[in-house]
Image: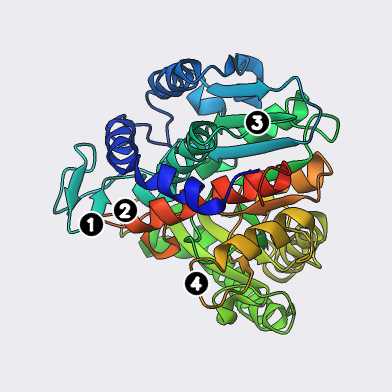
């Protein structure tokens, strides 16, 4: 048996190595969309695991599968990575998983987003919080356990996936579909997404992203009577969406979604496009929507409600409307007292006076493990800061990375029955 203080010291001894690894990792521009440099990112991670004696497999997604989900991005390779250490001693399988795609950096950074900077105890760079630091933490957590001589009885799996930022269907979703993550080979799963080192996340709300197009007929603006204005037809539909939004706000959840204002269903019109010129009556108007589901809702029920609003708008306006789905994610959640959650909570309290579990306001890849693979022993825990996700000058505090690494290491040791 090993005292946890030894584990924590082993993590602290690796601080420089962790930061150096993270800097090198962040320098690889794995922006999604469209999905740049996935092979380079996958090879970097595969090499890191091979050096650590994991049995490594790179999992390439067939072009036909990519085309099903991202038909305009088949010219970009989709490559996931999976490594496994298996002991001769019987025990559980602990699976860490995280995504290495990042959202586009955008402009107005004070730092080069792909030339990582260490300043004032923080590592700056796109993906530092969301969520390359989570992958670094899980890798070095196992390094620390091995350094203090813990027998990794059972197995430890690390998977690093792509496309989470656009739905995850060719990333962790594909690994689940192909059986790389299943109830037969996974006892405990930790998704290392950014919720900071002080708390676990039990699940997330769902989402339905879609567009609706109102169709009309073009005409010269001076003879508008010859046309059918799609903008005005869309105005009718948007009014119905506004009323629908009020209904959704009455659907709430008792789960600890953070922030509390997000403990309700919602819908937002996020983009609108119409028109060719100021003197042409537009024959089409397209609006894009972001529909958020609380855990008691389903994507199919949300679809049916939207179709009902479209039918009503068609009757009221005499215009045809078309629905196009962009992406969906079912809500997911696990019990607060699941074994992996309770274990992480206990170890978090070594570093914080108190902790409370949360549920994410947005969606992530946890749903594939919980909903599709049927694994309830799955939580989200990682060092990144939620408020740093997708922002300019994204950063992660080094102390957060070290603390999360310690919690991951100690919790893994507990789950393997190797600590005092």
Query: What distance separates the C-alpha of mark 1 from that of mark 2?
Result: 6 Å
In front of the other: 367 or 192 = 192
Residue 35 visible in this rendered orientation of the protein: yes
Q: Which residue is mark 1?
A: 121
Q: Which residue is mark 3?
A: 151
Q: Secondary structure at mark 3?
A: loop
User: Quadrant of residue 239 in the image?
Assistant: bottom right
Upstream in the sequence, badge 1 or badge 2?
1
Give the label, 3 or 2, closer to the camera.
3
Q: Secondary structure at mark 2?
A: helix
Q: Which residue is mark 4?
A: 352
Upstream in the sequence, badge 3 or badge 1?
1
Judge the density around disc 4: few (<14), some (14-19), many (≥20) Cα neighbours within 10 Å. few
Q: Which residue is mark 2?
A: 398
**Residue 161, horizontal then vertical, whole percent:** 55, 31
In front of the other: 82 or 150 = 150
Query: What distance separates the C-alpha of mark 4 from that of mark 3?
Result: 28 Å
**Residue 366, horizontal then vertical, whole percent:** 67, 48
**Circles 1 and 2 in contact, beta carbons < 8 Å:** yes
Residue 403 as seen in the image, left or right of residue 350? left
Give the label, 3 or 1, closer to the camera.
3
């Amino acid at each position: 048996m090993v005292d946890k203080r030894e584990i924590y010291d082993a993590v602290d001894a690796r601080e420089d190595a962790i930061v150096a690894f993270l800097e090198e990792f962040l320098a690889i521009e794995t922006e999604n969309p469209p999905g740049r440099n996935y092979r380079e990112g996958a090879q970097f991670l595969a090499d890191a695991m091979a050096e650590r004696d994991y049995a490594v497999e790179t999992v390439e997604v067939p072009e036909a599968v990519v085309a099903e989900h991202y038909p305009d991005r088949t010219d970009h390779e989709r490559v996931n990575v999976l490594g496994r250490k298996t002991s001769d001693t019987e025990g559980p399988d602990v699976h860490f998983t995280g995504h290495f795609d990042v959202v586009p950096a955008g402009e107005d950074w004070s730092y080069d987003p792909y030339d990582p900077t260490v300043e004032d105890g923080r590592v700056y760079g796109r993906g530092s919080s969301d969520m390359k630091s989570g992958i670094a933490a899980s890798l070095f957590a196992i390094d620390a356990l091995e350094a203090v001589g813990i027998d990794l009885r059972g197995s430890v799996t690390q998977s690093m996936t792509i496309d989470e930022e656009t739905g995850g269907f060719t990333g962790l979703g594909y690994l689940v579909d192909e059986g790389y993550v299943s109830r037969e080979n996974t006892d405990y799963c930790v998704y290392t997404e950014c919720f900071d080192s002080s708390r676990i996340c039990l699940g997330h709300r769902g989402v339905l992203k879609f567009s609706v197009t109102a169709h009309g007929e073009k005409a010269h603006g001076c003879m508008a009577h010859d046309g059918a204005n799609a903008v005005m037809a869309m105005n009718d539909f948007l009014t119905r969406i506004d009323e629908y939004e009020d209904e959704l706000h009455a659907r709430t959840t008792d789960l600890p979604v953070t922030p509390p204002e997000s403990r309700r269903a919602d819908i937002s019109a996020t983009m609108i496009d119409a028109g060719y010129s100021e003197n042409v009556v537009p024959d089409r108007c397209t609006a894009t929507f972001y529909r958020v589901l609380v855990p008691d809702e389903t994507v199919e029920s949300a679809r049916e409600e939207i179709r009902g609003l479209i039918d009503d708008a068609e009757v009221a306006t005499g215009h045809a409307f078309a629905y196009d789905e962009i992406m969906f994610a079912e809500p997911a959640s696990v019990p607060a007292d699941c074994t992996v959650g309770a274990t992480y909570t206990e170890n978090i309290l070594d570093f914080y006076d108190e902790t409370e579990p949360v549920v994410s306001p947005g969606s992530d890849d946890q749903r594939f493990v919980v909903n599709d693979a049927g694994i309830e022993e799955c939580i989200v825990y990682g060092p990144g800061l939620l408020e740093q996700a997708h922002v300019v000058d994204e950063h992660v505090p080094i102390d957060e990375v070290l603390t999360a690494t310690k919690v991951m290491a100690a919790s893994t040791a507990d789950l393997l029955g190797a600590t005092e």
